[in-house]
Amino acid sequence: MRTRDTDDGETGYTELATNARAAESGDGATLESALSIAEARLDESTKALAESIELNAFLESVLNASNDCIKVLSPSGELVFMNGGGRAVMEVDDFESLRGCPWIGFWEGESRSDAEAALEAARQGRTGHFVGPCKTAKGTDKFWDVTVTLVPASDRRDAHFLSISRDITVQHLLEVKQELIARESAHRVKNILSVVQAVAMQTLADAPGLSDYASRLQSLSEAQDLLLRSTAGTVSLKELVETSLRPICNMRCEIEGEEVRLDAEQGLALSMAVHELATNAIKYGALSNGTGSVRVDWSVSGTRLIFRWTESGGPVVAQPIVDGFGTKVMTRNLESHFGGVVTRQFHRDGLRLVLSADL
């Protein structure tokens, strides 16, 4: 006779009694054998139970050792479990007061929409992720990096969710501070450029080449504006080219290329280069007549950027014997800040410049 196993070893005693009754009509050896079998099975059951308890205790200690807030949510999104480390970082003294509360309800403003989207993504079998602010149980402002995943179950409708929130408050505050410093620095640089331009215009009003000098300063100022508006400290290559050429080319410039982000130094170098190329095109190249045009395009293969400036329809051009100051500075800046190579070809109807560099 066999009965359903239980955690307290009841099976061993049941089999013992059954085997003992079966052995009443036999000799003592049969009874002793039955007792030995029952004791062995009882020992196995007790050992398995002890190992299970020990494993559960170990897993709980592992969860509690984490500084992340690890939560289990019910299929409908209510809070079911929170690890000890999570209760500490969330300043929760009494978890029972929070058990059963909707997890979404802990988030406010845009973060609530992000949390709903993350939960829905997990429900669809994907990993939900977002970052956002959420107060602790005692009202302390904190910033979190959150992932939500589905815990597999035989019936998907009964599947729970695992939510892991990492406290990134210190990192977030540092990033905010760095962004403020960067924006303030960029703003001051822009102001300095304006002052230098004004002083130059007043002091050297009749000096040759002053307009070119002022124009270069203006180009730098516009590039700084783009970087100042960027929250990531980078600038769009396409937006940079469009801004640099807008007052010069009008409908005679064609711009084409995929989205590429440049860092601050690359952005300033390219802005100055485009301005220099456009100025030369107006003076000597394709934009110096009524029929010429300029095409600016770029492509990325892997990490390799190929940037092209192509003039066509202009007067016959030839390679100069000596490069001008602006051309030398442009080439040096591009190769230095991009870590690439600049090549120039002087075709009959216009200049071809190519920058090849790894991003």
Image (tube, helix red, strand yellow):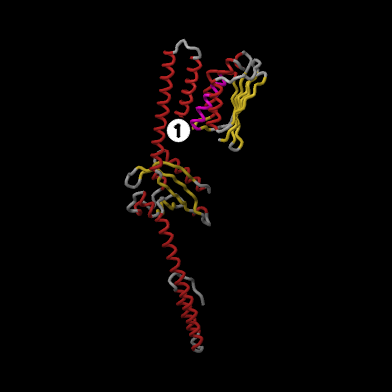
Q: Quadrant of the C terminus?
A: top right
Residue lying at the far top of the rendered structure: 206
Quarter of the figure with residue 299? top right
Q: Is residue 249 left or right of residue 132?
A: right
Does 357 appear above or below 346? Answer: below
Q: Which amino acid does the dot numbered 1 rest on?
A: Thr
What secondary structure do most residues of the magenta stretch adopt?
Answer: helix
Q: What span is colored magenta in the figure?
A: 263-278
**Residue indicated by mark 1:** 231
Q: Is residue 100 left or right of residue 125?
A: left
Q: Residues within 10 Å of mark 1 (few under 14, many from 20)?
A: few
Any magenta on residue 264? yes
* Residue 52 in the image, given as x and y percentages of width and height: 45, 66
- Please tell me which residue is depicted at 61% across the width and 17% down the height of the picture: 285
Quarter of the figure with residue 110? top left
Residue lying at the far front of the rendered structure: 322
- Please tell me which residue is depicted at 38% across the width and 43% down the height of the picture: 170
Does 252 appear above or below 137? Answer: above
Quarter of the figure with residue 254? top right
